[in-house]
Image: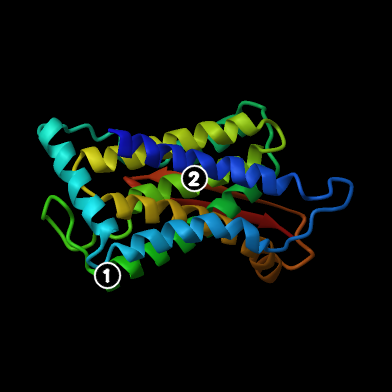
Amino acid sequence: MFKLKLILALTMFLPLYNYAQDKQVIDSLPEKNTLRVTSFIIPAVFIGYGIAAGGDNFIRDLDRTTRNELQEDHPFFSVHADNYMQYAPAAAVFALNLSGVKGKHSLGDAAGYYAVSMAIMTASTRITKAQTYRLRPDGTTNNSFPSGHTATSFAAAEFLRQEYKDVSPFIGYAGYVVAGTTGILRLYNNRHWVSDVVAGVGFGVISTKLGYFLYPHLKKLVLGKEVKNYAFVPMYQQGTAGFAFSANF
């Protein structure tokens, strides 16, 4: 149990670290769309930790002992709220916007940032899963590394933080709590090793940071400078989720 609390504490350190980095930006100047390398250090360390578990070392031993302890203490645990919680921080962005609590960007731009971030996260995790071919702790499939649910939830949590860090940092912290809980549930449900979840945190956060860097360039490339207004919002129809786009020139 101590190990899980430590993991959750580490994930909660990320928004505090990012907040400290954000305070270094000069508020009086227009924000530039640049990548700050320092903001990638901690997420990259998380990914490195997960990769290191591919060898026969203490990290892999921690994977096994944690899994064995959880199965011994909670052999029949089966709570699948993580299937829905992974999207909750992103849903909060749109819910807050629609309820009148405006974030950093318009609803259309926010959806665009999220779409690009999710595309990066999905591509990177799927490629990594296929290349590493790590067996899940429950023995069902060989696509354990990294945890896709955890990556999705932390990409969404960082998205929420980016949009509302100027409104209240506590909104971002709440998103990270939900994301951390999602990762913990993946362990309790015997679907991932600890290293899978830790790496998933890194993949998710880095994907959103890259998404926030790339989206303005993609928007300019696709729409140019003459677009007057546009809408880019999530949609759900006949069992399929996606995005609807329209623009006036």
**Measured from the top left, where is residue 219 in percent x and y?**
67, 63
The residue singled out by tag 2 in the image is 156
Mark 2 element type: helix
Identified at 57% across, 37% down, the residue is 93
Residue 194 is left or right of residue 19, and the answer is left
> Which of the colour schemes (rainbow, by chain, secondary structure, one colour) is used?
rainbow
Q: Which of these two is toward me, 158 or 14? A: 14
**Measured from the top left, where is residue 37 in percent x and y?**
64, 63
Identified at 51% across, 42% down, the residue is 157
Q: Examine the image and state in which quarter residue 161 appears.
A: top right
Q: Which of these two is toward me, 57 or 131? A: 57
Please, what is the three-letter code of the amino acid marked with disc 2?
A: Ala
The residue singled out by tag 1 in the image is 132
**Measured from the top left, where is residue 224 in percent x and y?**
74, 68
Q: Quick check: can you spot residue 56?
A: yes
Mark 1 element type: helix
Using the image, determine if residue 47 lies above or below residue 221: above
Q: Examine the image and state in which quarter residue 211 appears.
A: bottom right
